[in-house]
């Protein structure tokens, strides 16, 4: 998914309109977007909303497009609110022990709720120094679909005072890209930009994240969604070139060669891997 829009779990009005915002996916939020005094109300609201979605939408659509961000304080109560099959549970301040505990909670909840065993994935949200160091281990854990990163929390834990869009912090985020690739799971989800008014800056930072290896990004405001979708969608020119390279490579292989020259540059299997990835992202 290119874009994932956070929707507060205690706002039934926003949940009702969430599908209209143009994002590829939704993250129903029980954590930061909900005040502590409203957590119980939010769980009830989310449970009711999910039950309605389960009755009106296909299981495949819910699994493809809906995640739930739970709290670190009461994951059991949050998971109990899942009344229909969803794609994933996002685990804040993720470290191996907490992710293993949430996986065990999902085992029991799926069995009790009559949901398909193992159908709900996990997305560890890296927000601590320990979580960052354990990113390779987290990426290899059962149920884990991909990794995500919470920049503000991680920067606070590290005592980082630099530019969160700067090269120094991008070096830290690259560790998630490596961990996901090594584990053979989906590319990580890029962090939210809290400035939802400066869409030019959002476009520039998202383009840098694309170059870094991220393939999707969270949003906190609907205005961010079209920009994120645009950046993570290959251009028509990129698609045409990728398709041409793949076709030429397949012709070259049939003729007994694994390489060919295109516009003065050698093209081999590694280049074609990138071309196929462009075509996959283009759908």
Image: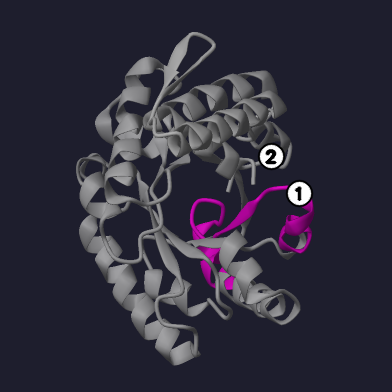
Task: Indicate left or right for 158 with 112 as reference.
Answer: left
What residue is drawn where x is 38% and y is 31%?
258
Q: Are marks 1 and 2 in contact (CB under 8 Å)?
A: yes
Q: Quadrant of residue 14?
A: bottom right
The answer to whether 178 is drawn above or below residue 162 in the figure is: below
Regarding residue 282, the answer to whether it shows in the image is yes
Instruction: Determine which of the numbered discs, if any, sits on residue 21 in the image.
Output: 1
The coloring applied to the image is: one colour
Q: Which residue is mark 2?
A: 225
Residue farthest to the front?
255
Front residue of 240 and 55: 240
Magenta span includes 20: yes
Report the residue at 50% width, 29% height from top.
210
The stretch in magenta equals: 14-42
Locate residue 269, reporting x and y percent. 39, 32
- Residue that appears at 58% across and 30% down: 242
Q: Is residue 195 visible?
A: no
Q: Secondary structure at mark 2?
A: helix
């Amino acid at each position: 998914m290119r874009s994932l829009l956070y929707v507060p779990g205690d706002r039934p009005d926003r949940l009702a309109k969430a599908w209209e915002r143009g994002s590829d996916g939704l993250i129903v939020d029980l954590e930061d977007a909900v005040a502590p005094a409203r957590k119980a109300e939010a769980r009830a609201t989310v449970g009711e909303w999910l039950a309605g979605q389960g009755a009106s939408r296909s299981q495949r659509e819910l699994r493809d497009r809906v995640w739930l961000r739970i709290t670190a304080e009461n994951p059991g109560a949050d998971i109990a609110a899942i009344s229909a099959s969803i794609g994933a549970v996002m685990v804040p301040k993720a470290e191996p022990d907490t992710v293993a505990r949430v996986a065990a909670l999902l085992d029991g909840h799926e069995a009790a709720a009559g949901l398909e065993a193992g159908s709900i994935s996990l997305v560890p949200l890296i927000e601590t120094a320990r979580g960052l160091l354990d990113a390779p281990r987290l990426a290899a854990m059962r149920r884990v679909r991909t990794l995500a990163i919470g920049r503000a929390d991680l920067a606070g834990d590290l005592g980082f005072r630099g530019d969160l869009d700067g090269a120094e912090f991008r070096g830290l985020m690259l560790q998630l890209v490596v961990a996901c690739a090594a584990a053979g799971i989906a590319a990580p989800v890029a962090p939210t930009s809290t400035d939802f008014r400066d869409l030019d800056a959002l476009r520039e930072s998202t383009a840098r994240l694309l170059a870094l290896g991220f393939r999707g990004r969270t949003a906190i405001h609907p205005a961010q969604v079209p920009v994120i979708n645009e950046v993570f969608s290959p251009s028509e020119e990129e698609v045409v070139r990728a398709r041409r390279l793949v076709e030429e490579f397949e012709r070259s292989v049939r003729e007994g060669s694994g390489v060919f020259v295109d516009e003065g540059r050698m093209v081999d299997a590694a280049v074609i891997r990138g071309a196929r990835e462009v075509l996959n992202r283009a759908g």
